[in-house]
Image (cartoon, helix red, strand yellow):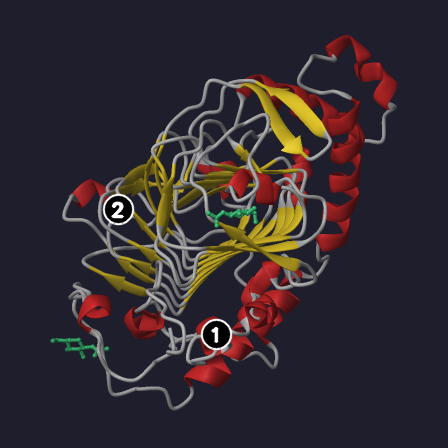
Amino acid sequence: MATLNKRFFQVLFFFMAFAVLLPALHAEDGPEMDEYWKKRAEIAFEKAQNAYNPNPEEVTESVNQKVGKFMTGFINKVQHNTTRRQLMKKKYKGPCMATNPIDQCWRCDPNWGKYRKRLADCAIGFGRNTIGGKKGRFYIVNDTSDDIVNPKPGTLRYGVIQKKPLWIVFARSMIIRLKEELMVTCDKTIDGRGSNVHIAYGAGITLQYVQNVIIHNIHVHDIVAGEGGMIRDSVDHVGFRTPSDGDGISMFGASNIWIDHVSMYRCGDGLIDAIMGSTGVTISNSHFTNHNEVMLFGANDKHNQDKLMQITVAFNHFGKGLVQRMPRCRHGFFHVVNNDYTHWLMYAIGGSMNPTIISQGNRFIAPPNGNAKEVTKRENYPESEWRHWTWRSEGDLMMNGAFFVQSGNPNFDSKSKEGMITAKPGHMVTSITRFAGTLRCKKGYSC
Ligand SMILES: *[C@@H]1O[C@H](CO)[C@@H](O)[C@H](O)[C@H]1NC(C)=O
Ligand SMILES: *[C@@H]1O[C@H](CO)[C@@H](O)[C@H](O)[C@H]1NC(C)=O
């Protein structure tokens, strides 16, 4: 995300959050925040309020109930008790096996290609209301070129800047090298099923002040910083952007976003950032490798609007070559459930500024380094401060000496536990995340 923009929007959000008059901002007005974006910012802030759930425990509960229900009777025999995943995904040749409730919702239907939009009803967690382009037409990407001011029909950029909802699919396998950030607008699905789609070697995907976007089954990797300049961000608007940092997927004041079955690695900055009050987000079934700072939820201790943030991280595989921030959180409420953490070099989950982090049924395999066995990391604050932050671990499987330092309200979960089926225990996570990352789907066959 462009730095100048960040600073500017930070100021804007600060004022909006405290209902101070916007005209006070005029002195700050730069070319990157024109009337068009001011309007978008206002709308986004309102929508974010709507996506925010004042009782987040309810949502974690419903994810847990779904996982619980589904997994009852599920291949309990398979005890994955080793630290290796043994390339199961490539080897697997049996009948379709959907190992978590999101996948179960669509994956084993051989007609997935005919009824692509059924996917829109499959999100759970905080991003559960995301339907993307369900109400729109299909748009087929058949051109890998990228003109950032006058995108050609048939290109991905032309699709994502349209005003109407669109369900975007790909005519064939392709690598798209974006010249600058891809400025996605509201109500879009980017659906890579059936093709092998890579967004790579160029700029990343930006979800700025948008609502209702699904990103599904694509690879995003080797993203590099852009130079900025004039970029078309809507059919009727071209705006100036400062250089982008090289994030893979960057959410900025975005709400109702669902990222599923995405494979991501080697980006210039973060793989996924959600900042400036982004909320109503689910990141699921994805595979992350070879990257330092994986996920940043909240960019600055001073961004009080991030108290709105509610993000579910479920059924993902955090794999080889990862270092830290899976995720790193500020202020908001984060449910980290049934993920497989097989590699980290520094730590897995961290944060500052009183984020609530509920870790349930994950598997954490610590690295050999004796100084990096701790799953958690509190940044910049003394224990006298962080011991009030609610970070809880429930049913997590700790291997190779991994340990999670809990803090905050020890009764937090027992309160929301009433009538609640907990996440599946950590030892089932290898099965649950077995098909994390992009899937090779062929029309007429289950995925
Ligand atoms: C894992 O393996 C160890 C030793 O091989 C065994 O003692 C333990 O019961 C196993 N745990 C599970 C959950 O299968
Ligand atoms: C690509 O899609 C565009 C827009 O739908 C269309 O106008 C164009 O003819 C297509 N090109 C090819 C080669 O199919």
Residue 320 in percent (x, y) is at 22, 49
Residue 165 in percent (x, y) is at 68, 53
Q: Are marks 2 and 1 in contact (CB under 8 Å)?
A: no
Q: Earlier in the sequence, mark 2 or mark 1?
A: 1
Q: Quadrant of the C terminus?
A: bottom left
**Residue visible at 28% across and 62% down?**
398
The amino acid on which the numbered mark 1 sits, given as a three-letter code, is: Trp
Q: From the viewer's perspective, is the residue at label 2 or at label 1 nearer? A: 1
Q: Quadrant of ligand 1?
A: bottom left
Residue 313 seen in render: yes
The amino acid on which the numbered mark 2 sits, given as a three-letter code, is: Trp
In this image, 408 relative to 315: left or right? right
**Label 1: which secondary element:** loop
Residue bearing mark 2 = 344
Q: Is mark 1 within 8 Å of ligand 2?
A: no
Residue most extreme to the top: 27
Mark 2 vs mark 1, CA separation in Å: 35 Å
Residue 267 lies, with reference to residue 363, above or below; the image says above
Residue bearing mark 1 = 112
